[in-house]
Amino acid sequence: MAQHIAQPTVTSPELPAKLPIGAIVPWAVFFGILMLILLYFVGAEQGATSVVSGEYVHEWVHDARHLLGYPCH
Ligand SMILES: [Zn+2]
């Protein structure tokens, strides 16, 4: 009397989900533009090209200017 013993099925390890590049690119562009705007306010928001008059923005980002090596004072 032969019994059939079921063999455990070997499953391949799950592969990591593929990144949908088409869904990531718009967010990457969006955050890249935001970072460029932030970089502008940190690095160039003063003098003749200032968007906000006065020294407020400069003072708020003063430590970031020094951290990134922008000439300041
Ligand atoms: Zn400074």
Image (cartoon, grey):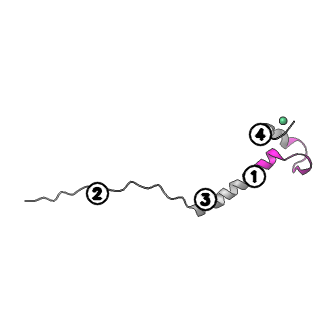
Mark pair 4, 2: CA separation: 58 Å
Q: Are marks 4 and 3 in contact (CB under 8 Å)?
A: no
Per the rendered image, the range of residues in magenta is: 39-56
For the residues bearing labels 1 and 3, Cβ distance under 8 angstroms: no
Q: Give the structural element (helix, strand or loop) at label 3.
A: helix
Residue 49: which numbered mark, if any? none
Q: Are marks 4 and 2 in contact (CB under 8 Å)?
A: no
Mark 3 lies on residue: 24
Give the amino acid at mark 2: Thr
Q: Amino acid at mark 4?
A: Ala
Disc 2 on helix, strand or loop? Answer: loop
Q: Left or right of 17: which side holds 46?
A: right
Q: What residue sits right under mark 4 in the picture?
A: 64
Residue that mark 1 sits on:
36
What is the distance, in whole Å, between disc 1 and disc 4 at their CAs? 14 Å
Q: Position of residue 71 (x, y in %)?
A: 84, 40
